[in-house]
Image: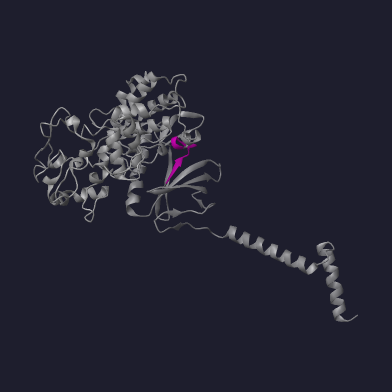
Amino acid sequence: MNDISMYTSLTQKMNMNLFGGVKRPLTQLTLNITHVYHNVQKRLQEEAPIEPLVDEQGYIILPIGYVTYNYVVVQMIHKGAQAVIYEVKNRDTNQAYILKIARIQRYFQLQTQAEHSFYNLLQQISSQIAPELIQSFSIQNSRALLLQKFEISLKQLLQLTNNRGLPLQYMKLVTAQFAHLLNLFQQFNFIHGDMRLENFVLNTDSPAELRIIDFGCSTINNTANYAHAHLWYRAPEQLFLLPISHKIDSFAVGCMLYELHTGKPLFCPNGEFQLAKQLFQILDLSSTPLYSNPASNSITTSHSTTNPLQSRSIDQNPTSSKSHLQSRSLDTSLPLQYPDSLPLQNTPLINQFTNPFNALDFERFKAIFRTCGSNEHSKTLPTKETAEEFSVYDQIVKETRKTGKELIKYLIVNKEFLNQSGHGMLEYEQFAELVNGLIENDVNKRFGWKEIMESKFME
């Protein structure tokens, strides 16, 4: 037997032994080699170090399975304006936590540093306010907060109902929790600044025990800028850049209560112009301008408290306007007066948006109004375009001729619950009265925690 014959015979015997008598041993050998290769590559990849990366926006992106300080990354939950949120678990105990990592820019690092301090402060006040801050550390030179994990947010709870809303009985439980928080915040001169459904969390076994999260916009002694708070919950004084107080959190509570029961946000604008129009419709600002005395036929403003609602489009010939409100002087410290023949309460809605101001007034206030969408090219202040903006309430206002508190009473009734136990018209009137008190335009009359608990709805 020659060498070739011996080699062929030996190969056939090996193939029969290795592959169980498969008729195409070379094909099978190739498949096995490929399989082994992929297994080896997979093993090498699993054993290779996985490092975080920083994306173009400054977010720290952690790979799934990445281990930091004995915590394994399970999933990315959310990319917020300030930070990226992950679910992680302890490798030893398998306990789940929330990991919040700030964007690398210095501004967001400082925000998270302040948030760290707020968590520590609130834990000293009460363990029933916010999730427990487990620890803080640095990842890729970025500050990270490890927090106690709660199962769902109020937003997710509402979504579980297919946005049909939650019953008024649950509204009372939630309202009591909101009032408790507002009471504590007022005592310590603390403003959260970003109250919304996503920032309240709970566990399903105790749905009435809420915790508030995300203190990136929070402040003590009112040192922060709230011009860019979430549009759905932004108070009028925030939108129009007027002096603010802890009452902006009360306004947000009113918006949340409405949304939790009806399943729809009270204000759902695409931008500042739409929000301004909805504020005018819902708060009935057609008859009561911000911070004015409805009993008076004149509005007095000063340089320090200039009402942005009175600022209008650039018009070099303001006297040509047919608006009832006339600009009396370039000096805004002088009053803008209503004609005696036209009482304030009869001023048409559109006149609140279209009173002309000249170029000098725009130059004086353009830095402020630019944050609401104005610029030198449009030569238009936000309130000029507000009258032309679409609002989800346009048709309802047109058909029912209701605005302000009457409009809230009309909108707040959830037909899913109407006439069920605890959902009669009396209960709805009391609930509407509470919501109207919380979103009151006059901050001096807007409900705080005490007025909430003394409301008829909470009896």
Rendering quarter of residue 397? top left
Residue positioned 80% across, 67% down in the render: 25
**In terms of depth relative to the viewer, which is nearer, 32 or 235?**
235
Q: Is residue 33 magenta?
A: no
Image height of 27 relative to 311, above or below: below
Name the residue furthest bottom.
2
Residue 389, position as x, y percentages in the image = 30, 44
* Residue stretch in magenta: 145-155
**In terms of depth relative to the viewer, which is nearer, 295 or 448?**
295
Residue 199, position as x, y percentages in the image = 40, 38
Quadrant of the image for the C terminus? Answer: top left
Q: Is residue 146 magenta?
A: yes
Is residue 88 among the parts visible in the rendering? yes
Residue positioned 32% across, 49% down in the render: 110
Rendering quarter of residue 457? top left
Is residue 150 among the parts visible in the rendering? no
Residue 255, position as x, y percentages in the image = 35, 33
**In terms of depth relative to the viewer, which is nearer, 304 or 33?**
304
Image height of 75 relative to 443, above or below: below
Quadrant of the image for the N terminus? Answer: bottom right
Tell me: 17 left or right of 269.
right
Tell me: 145 left or right of 349.
right
Rendering quarter of residue 351? top left
Residue 450, position as x, y percentages in the image = 30, 24
Q: How many numbered markers are drawn?
A: 0
State the scheme by which the image is colored: one colour
